[in-house]
Image (cartoon, rainbow, N blue to C red):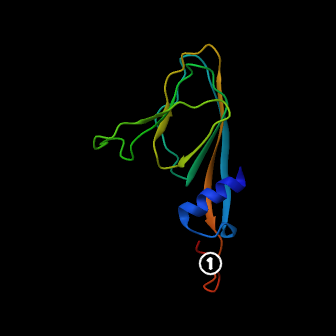
């Protein structure tokens, strides 16, 4: 997963993948029971969020990604992502996100972590741009 993320971020930031270091600042897991949900929130101390879905029963609620300005969405509707078991979703940490209410009798389980991107010291003679 680390190498895949570096490839993605090298395309986003347009830096040579060898120049990018991923720093996991914290990680956690969630277990949503019936009628549980995650309220809209963001991760202001990170650059990116990674959610790995370990168990996603049917009717356990979709992931909701909100427009960048949650208070004035300028006509944009939240995106609802129907995640499945073994899906991995990566998005910018500043995006508000949450989940729908779970209507499943089985628990939904995911593991998440925050990432900071470190572009290693840029030497003016190095070929760091992609």
Q: Position of residue 4 (x, y in %)?
A: 68, 53
Residue 46 appears in the picture as rendered: no
Q: Is residue 102 left or right of residue 19?
A: left
Q: Taking 18 as reference, is 70 above or below it?
A: above
Counting labels gives 1
Q: Taking 76 as reference, is 34 above or below it?
A: above
Q: Is residue 52 left or right of residue 72?
A: right
Q: Which residue lies at the image location 63% right of the left edge and 26% below the top edge?
A: 56
Q: Position of residue 65 (x, y in %)?
A: 46, 39
Query: Which of 35/12 is in front?
Result: 12
> Label 1, on which residue?
122
Location of residue 130 (image quadrant): bottom right
Q: Residue furthest bottom?
A: 125
For the residue labelled by badge 1, is the local secondary structure a helix, a strand or a loop? loop
Within-10-Å neighbours for mark 1: few <14, some 14–19, many 20+: few
Q: Residue furthest top?
A: 105
Q: Taking 11 as reference, is 33 above or below it?
A: above
Q: Taking 28 as reference, is 56 above or below it?
A: above
Q: Which residue lies at the image location 62% right of the left edge and 13% below the top edge?
A: 105
Q: Position of residue 128 (x, y in %)?
A: 62, 76
Q: Is residue 76 left or right of residue 28?
A: left
Location of residue 12 (image quadrant): bottom right
Residue 80 appears in the picture as rendered: yes
Query: Which of 26/10 is in front?
Result: 10
Location of residue 107 (image quadrant): top right
Q: Which residue lies at the image location 51% right of the left edge and 28% below the top edge?
A: 62
């Amino acid at each position: 997963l680390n190498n895949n993320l570096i490839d993605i971020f090298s395309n986003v930031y347009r830096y040579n993948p060898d120049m990018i270091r991923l720093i996991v600042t914290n990680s956690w897991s969630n277990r949503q029971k019936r009628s549980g949900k995650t309220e809209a929130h963001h991760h202001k101390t990170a650059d990116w969020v990674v959610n790995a879905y370990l168990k996603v029963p049917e009717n356990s609620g979709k992931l909701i990604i909100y427009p960048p300005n949650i208070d004035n969405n300028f006509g944009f509707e939240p995106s609802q992502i129907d995640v499945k078991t073994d899906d991995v979703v990566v998005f910018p940490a500043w995006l508000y996100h949450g989940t729908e209410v779970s209507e499943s009798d089985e628990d939904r389980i995911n593991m998440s972590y925050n990432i900071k991107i470190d572009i290693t010291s840029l030497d003016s003679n190095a070929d760091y741009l992609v």
